[in-house]
Image: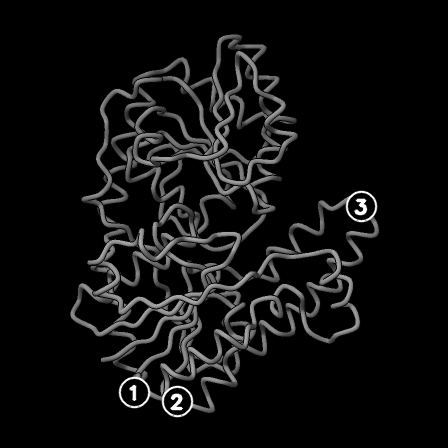
Amino acid sequence: MKILQLCNKAPYPANDGSSIAISTLAEGIADNGVELHLLPINTKKHFKPEENIPAEFKQKTNYQSVYRNADTSIAGALFNLFSSQSYFVSRFFFKEYETQLINKLKNHTFDIIQIEGVFMATYIPTIQQYSKAKIVLRSHNVEHQIWERHLTNEKNGIKKTYLSIQNNRLKSFEINAFNQVDAIVTITDEDKKTIASLCPNKPIHTCLTGINLNKYKQVVEPTHSNTLFHFASMDWMPNIEAVDWLLKEVWNDVIKQQPNAKLVLAGRGMPDRFKKLASANITIIDDVKDSAEFYNTYDVMLVPLWSGSGLRIKLVEGLAYGKAIITTSIGAEGIPYSSGKDLIIADSGKDFSKAIIDLLTDNAKKQSLQLAARKLAEHTFDYKTIGQRLISFYEKIK
């Protein structure tokens, strides 16, 4: 079998959720003996020099990237209003990338072309013109669902109107893409159900985001125990909303009961307004250089998400590192957890602060969660097993 994987960002080094999702699946496919070709757009925002990519990864994935600037701009956003396309999608179409894609398709005969995320579906017409391969859309999230959840919380009337227009276009494009491809791969069963309702009779396979557990070494006693942390890409709106909610609805109550409590907010793209909150109780880390070292420094992970869909890769990493995790029902979507055993679900500010206080004052409970978290990761998220299951699905549809 021969697979071409298309993505809208360079996936290595894997230092955020989508990069981890793309790179680990690529390795899971390649390490099962399948010939894989990886063709990402190396965007200005998430630029990753090819010389920094390990030779082994480049060789096993036949890695080739195309540099382009996919940044949003006010002018581009306004000009897009006179178009029928969604700005969320159109900014990822580049003639230079299309040219490289056409060259790939002319020089290779693929069985499967796997599109990573709906934004790369803008290249479906090109694929159909130059290849007879089965086209599979790997849906990391139901994108229009994320924006619908976000719009319910948007207070700015002008911004809400603009985003509503863009999301309506995105929804139309996304549903059309679901129906254009030969099959769909989702990351959670929740997304599978949603997409199945939009395109009945379409082959759909749930493929969890796996991780190479050999790369995740659990430290028994972190250097800063009883320190809470939130670690996520802070240029993604659901994560910004999560931190806003945590600070507004939870943190003050925690400090009243535990004046010495410590919170670390970390992640690339940290907004300036959060940086200004640095204090004796709150530490801000804008750029985490070594995620393994970071995870093994603290022991209580907070994932207070209220929007978004798909699987939270950082949460999976937290499980692998054996963190005690407090999250919401939305944050835990896609995780086959037992609440109170593997992690704690708290869907209100009161419950979230109570859960934090409990872990800060009950070391035995915290340690129990840490052990269960690692076991859940080992039983559920092995990258090679997940890759083999996906290959089996592809054998059935090719």
The residue that mark 1 highlights is 109
Instruction: Give residue 25's mark.
Output: none
Q: Earlier in the sequence, mark 1 or mark 2?
A: 1
* Percent coordinates x, y for residue 42 in the rendering: 45, 61
Q: Nearer the viewer, residue 155 or 40?
A: 40
Which mark lies nearer to you, 3 or 1? Answer: 1
What residue is shown at x 36% (from left), y 40% (from top)? 338
C-alpha separation, residue under disc 1 versus residue under disc 2: 8 Å
Picture quadrant where residue 50 is located:
bottom left
* Looking at the image, residue 358 lies above or below residue 238: above
Left or right: where 105 falls relative to 181: left
* Percent coordinates x, y for residue 188 in the rendering: 42, 58
* Percent coordinates x, y for residue 73 in the rendering: 69, 56
CB of mark 1 within 8 Å of CB of mark 2?
A: yes
* Percent coordinates x, y for residue 105 in the rendering: 37, 85
What residue is shown at x 71% (from left), y 52% (from top)? 151
The furthest residue to the front? 51
The residue that mark 3 highlights is 156
Q: Nearer the viewer, residue 124 or 311?
A: 124
The residue that mark 2 highlights is 131
